[in-house]
């Protein structure tokens, strides 16, 4: 008994110290938020002696709406909803897997019934953290007043997150802008990383920048959008925990463990250029207004385009590099003792041209689109040398809209066929129906069939630690999706039923292999509002067979109260967010090949995560403080994002979103 008392006293002391530190953090954070609230109160008071200037918010039309001849004018989001979330999967309420920190390799824990057509090198685990390099997020921006938006967040372990958007019109119809994001942080649980390399390279370290511009002619017939994108990631690889059992049996500051990787790094470098132009055709007429019997004034143009010709150009380069000068990792073969400096480079140059026609007959609108696309592709690796490919494909789209007293009905069809090149014989065919009744109820259904070549790295993999050169059959995807929405309640229920043949997975110590399985996904989402009380949820059930690793159940949502204070000058929100998924054999992560790898020895999941937050909006400023993983120590000691990669413990972060005009 005496021995036990001597051994447990230091442990109790450490527990008390840990609890005291947590309480101090909470106190400091609430003090910080209180100061911000007082500042907001003072800032929100009106002053009749000051002249009020009208703020002209910028608006934009997305590339997708331009392509479909829709003029859906949108504004940049300024609400409190989700702005304190950083992880893109958490914003969507979808289950996901990463390495326990924001900005690390990640993948969704659900399966998309469709895959982007064309050549894919196969390194996609960082895509969620980068700006798209294919131009899919391009916009036609109109900013009569210069506009700047700054989003800044800071937290424990040197967490810094910055998002910057600036846009302004050079002329009335010519816009220019800049987007920038920066993310860096250190790990919470890994302490044996030392040396000069560690002082310069963080666990996750991201830089993204984008210069964009758009122009529309005076006649509204010619549009051009362009962007230069640059993505960079430089991350320290730890390899996870060397002894997960120690993590499972300790808590708090006692969780300090060694890691299998000491000096390994992974980097990604992606510059890209996008250029899209539209020449729209159709009759243009002047809108006039009679002033008197002898004079009329012109108000503007009345132009309803009947179609357009378009041309798109995309050039990009992606460089993926893994370095380990000591080669001291268990991911390599035992006889491998030399340093590693593996890299693969992908270069693509794509041109596409096409046209769109719009016809009207009474209350029926038909839009048909056809295009051709040609790509040059180059893959370089120091072991296999230079490989050159090409692709040539045809695309066709059709949309029919019917407006009646029984609602709006839309029929959509899309097809793409690869006639020559690396993806020759690939195809994608899909069709869908959508019916909307009085902006209250929406019914959607779609079917698709797709065949695509597997990723290039799955067939030819030559790096220092691995080697495979194999032929794999194309992947077949058959997919059906349906959903029903009740728009006033934001209530949505849906299902996805898919059949996959030769869906390729990575396996430990073996070449990738194809598997066949069926997939079923059912989900319900809602947002219930009762005066100032809000409750939102997304609940999903999915089944993919025993060999494909997915949680069978997931839940994501939140409860919050929203109200206005200080003479209605400040909108404030207080609430909880939560997410959970059932236990499953999650994929392991192999940093030497940058892939999630199948395994069936370790289960993770069955652990809830609860975050508490306070946020407020005053004029053009949003502020928040977020206390994440507040239930640590109350729901068990095993909380992993990926086998051997724990999630962060309880921690605090705060942030501000500020919008500036003129």
Image (cartoon, rainbow, N blue to C red):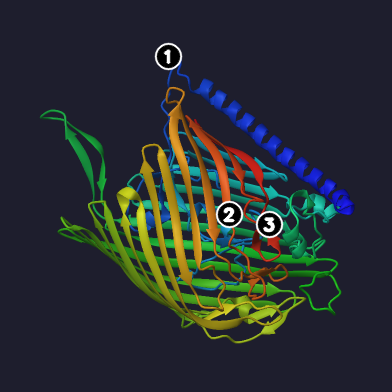
Q: Name the element at disc 3.
A: loop
Q: Residue, x 82% and y 56% (percent of image)?
A: 193
Q: CA distance from mark 1 to mark 2?
A: 45 Å
Nearest the eye: 123 or 345 = 123
Check the image and report above or below for 316 versus 383: above
Q: Earlier in the sequence, mark 2 or mark 3?
A: 2
In the displayed orientation, state which residue is furthest to the left.
293
Q: Name the element at disc 2.
A: strand
- In the rendered structure, the answer to whether residue 468 lies left or right of residue 113 reads right
In the displayed orientation, state which residue is furthest to the top.
49
Q: Which mark is residue 229?
A: 2
Q: Residue, x 47% and y 41% (percent of image)?
A: 560
Check the image and report above or below for 220 versus 518: above
Asked if the residues shown at circle 2 and circle 3 are in contact, with their CB atoms under 8 angstroms apart, the answer is no
Mark in the foreground, 1 or 2: 1
Q: Name the element at disc 1.
A: loop
Question: Pointer 1: residues within 10 angstroms few (<14), some, or many (20+)?
Answer: few
Asked if the residues shown at circle 1 and circle 2 are in contact, with their CB atoms under 8 angstroms apart, the answer is no
Mark in the foreground, 2 or 3: 3
- In the rendered structure, the answer to whether residue 306 lies left or right of residue 501 reads left
- In the rendered structure, the answer to whether residue 443 lies left or right of residue 33 reads left
Q: Which mark is residue 637?
A: 3
Q: Quadrant of residue 436?
A: bottom left
Which residue position is annotated with label 1? 48
Question: Pointer 2: residues within 10 angstroms few (<14), some, or many (20+)?
Answer: many
- Whether residue 494 is visible here, answered yes or no, is yes
Nearest the eye: 292 or 461 = 461
Where does residue 571 sit, x and y in percent of width and height? 46, 32
């Amino acid at each position: 008994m005496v021995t036990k008392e001597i051994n447990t006293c230091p442990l109790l002391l450490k527990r008390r110290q840990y609890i005291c530190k947590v309480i101090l953090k909470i106190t400091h954070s609430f003090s910080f938020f209180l100061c911000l609230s007082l500042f907001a109160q003072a800032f929100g008071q009106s002053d009749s002696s000051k002249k009020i200037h009208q703020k002209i918010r910028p608006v934009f039309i997305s590339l997708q709406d331009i392509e479909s001849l829709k003029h859906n004018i949108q504004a940049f989001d300024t609400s409190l909803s989700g702005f304190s979330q950083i992880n893109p999967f958490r914003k969507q309420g979808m289950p996901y897997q990463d390495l326990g920190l924001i900005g690390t390799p990640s993948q969704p824990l659900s399966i998309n019934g469709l895959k982007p057509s064309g050549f894919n090198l196969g390194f996609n685990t960082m895509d969620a953290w980068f700006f798209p390099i294919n131009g899919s997020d391009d916009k036609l921006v109109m900013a009569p007043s210069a506009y700047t938006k700054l989003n800044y967040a800071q937290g424990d372990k040197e967490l810094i997150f910055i998002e910057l958007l600036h846009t302004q019109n050079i002329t009335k119809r010519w816009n220019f802008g800049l987007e920038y994001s920066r993310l860096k942080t250190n790990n919470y649980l890994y302490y044996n990383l030392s040396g000069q390399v560690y002082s310069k390279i963080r666990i996750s370290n991201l830089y993204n920048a984008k210069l964009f511009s758009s122009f529309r002619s005076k006649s509204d017939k010619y549009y051009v959008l362009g962007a230069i994108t640059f993505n960079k990631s430089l991350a320290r690889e730890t390899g996870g925990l060397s002894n997960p059992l120690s993590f499972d049996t300790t808590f708090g500051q006692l969780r300090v463990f060694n890691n299998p990787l000491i000096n390994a790094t992974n980097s990604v470098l992606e510059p890209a250029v996008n250029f899209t132009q539209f020449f729209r055709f159709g009759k243009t007429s002047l809108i006039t207004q009679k002033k008197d019997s002898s004079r009329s004034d012109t108000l503007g143009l009345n132009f309803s385009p009947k179609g357009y010709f378009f041309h798109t150009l995309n050039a990009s380069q992606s460089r993926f590099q893994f370095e380990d000068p000591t080669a001291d990792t268990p991911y390599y073969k035992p006889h491998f003792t030399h340093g590693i400096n593996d890299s693969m480079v992908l270069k693509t140059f794509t041109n596409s041209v096409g046209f769109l026609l719009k016809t009207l007959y009474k209350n029926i609108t038909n839009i048909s689109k056809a295009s051709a696309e040609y790509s040059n592709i180059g893959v370089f690796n120091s072991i296999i040398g230079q490989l050159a490919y090409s692709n040539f494909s045809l695309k066709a789209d059709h949309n029919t809209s019917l407006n009646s007293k029984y609602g709006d009905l839309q029929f959509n069809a899309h097809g793409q066929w690869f006639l020559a090149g690396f993806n020759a014989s690939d195809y994608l065919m899909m069709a869908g129906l959508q019916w909307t009744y009085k902006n209250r109820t929406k019914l959607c259904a779609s079917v698709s069939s797709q065949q695509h070549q597997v990723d290039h790295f799955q067939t030819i993999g030559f790096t220092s630690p691995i080697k495979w050169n194999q032929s794999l059959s194309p992947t077949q995807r058959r997919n059906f999706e349906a959903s029903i929405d009740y728009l006033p309640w934001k209530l949505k229920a849906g299902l996805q039923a898919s059949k996959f043949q030769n869906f390729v997975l990575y396996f430990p110590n073996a070449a990738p292999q194809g598997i066949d399985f069926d997939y079923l996904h059912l989900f319900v989402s809602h947002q219930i509002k009762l005066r100032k009380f809000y409750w939102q949820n997304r609940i999903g059930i999915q089944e993919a067979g025993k060999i494909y690793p997915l949680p069978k159940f997931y839940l994501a949502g939140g409860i919050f109260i929203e109200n206005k204070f200080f003479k209605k000058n400040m909108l404030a929100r207080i609430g909880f967010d939560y997410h959970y998924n059932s236990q499953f054999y999650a994929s392991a992560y192999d940093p030497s090949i940058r892939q999630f790898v199948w395994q069936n020895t370790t289960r993770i999941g069955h652990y809830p995560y609860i975050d508490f937050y306070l946020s407020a909006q005053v004029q053009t400023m949003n502020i928040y403080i977020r206390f994440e993983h507040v239930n640590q120590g109350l729901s068990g000691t095993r909380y992993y994002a990926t086998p051997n990669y724990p999630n962060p413990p309880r921690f605090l972060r705060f942030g501000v979103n500020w919008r500036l005009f003129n």
